[in-house]
Image (tube, rainbow, N blue to C red):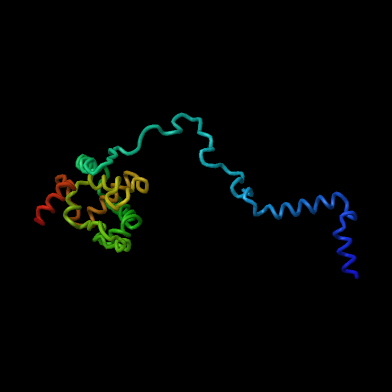
Amino acid sequence: MLLHDFKHHFFDFKHHSPLTLLALLLLAASTSAWGFPWDRDMVDQPSIKPQESITPPEPNAVPIQGGETLPSPTTEREIFAAKDAAATIPNPVPATAESIARGADFYQVHCKVCHGQQGHGDGPVSVKFVENSPVDLNETHTQDQTDGQLFFTITRGRVAMPFYRDALSPPERWDLINFIRDSFGHGNVKDAAPTSDKKLMATNLSDTQ
């Protein structure tokens, strides 16, 4: 009897003031709206969205020049020609102990997963390649390339190898090349005559015939 009287009194809106009814309606609406599609509290929080920040008014605040100095080839023929042209690019970073040490750190972070600790192309990621596995950095084909050609490959990538121009600055790429020269293949050798991938492919084809 008491429960019946309580329910009757509670749900009898005639006994509630307008403010009480309004509070109940707002509470019900707020809790049910949490799952509605238009609930974007996490998205519309007070933070700067992309492209919303104000451009600094100072002179030269936005760079309009700079970037990579090598061309951007789009076809296989252009890639071969661009790599041949890159053979004349000199290495501006002396192969000091400090440079080689920095290059060793870069190799551990960016290269070892594919090329392996000793540069034989047997890193942990290499087993995932069905074909075009990572090259052996100790082979003559790699060591006979000039520093400029190695710089080109690191900058532009090749076959399954991604480019690293976003991950490594130009000086860091030269440090990495100094480490490759010092640690793999012939060691500290001077730049050899340029060897293009196209010439190497033609040589390999003639050897198999």
Report if residue 55 is visible in the image.
yes
Q: Residue furthest top?
A: 59
Q: Residue at x 37, y 48 (%)?
A: 167
Q: Is residue 129 above or below residue 198?
A: below
Q: Residue at x 85, y 49 (%)?
A: 19
Name the residue nearer the viewer: 71 or 171: 71
Left or right side of 84 for 36: right
Where is residue 107? Give x, y as percent. 31, 55
Name the residue nearer the viewer: 170 or 40: 40
Report if residue 89 is visible in the image.
no
Left or right side of 167 for 139: left
Q: Quadrant of the N terminus?
A: bottom right
Where is residue 145? Give x, y as percent. 19, 48
Where is residue 159? Give x, y as percent. 27, 51
Where is residue 60? Give x, y as percent. 44, 31
Left or right side of 77 for 21: right
Q: How many marks?
A: 0
Q: Is residue 42 above or below residue 10?
A: above
Q: Is residue 4 above or below residue 28?
A: below
Q: Quadrant of the C terminus?
A: bottom left
Q: Residue at x 88, y 65 (%)?
A: 6
Q: Residue at x 81, y 50 (%)?
A: 22
Q: Quadrant for residue 194, please give it.
A: top left
Q: Quadrant for residue 62, please give it.
A: top left
Q: Residue furthest bottom?
A: 1
Name the residue nearer the viewer: 19 or 173: 19
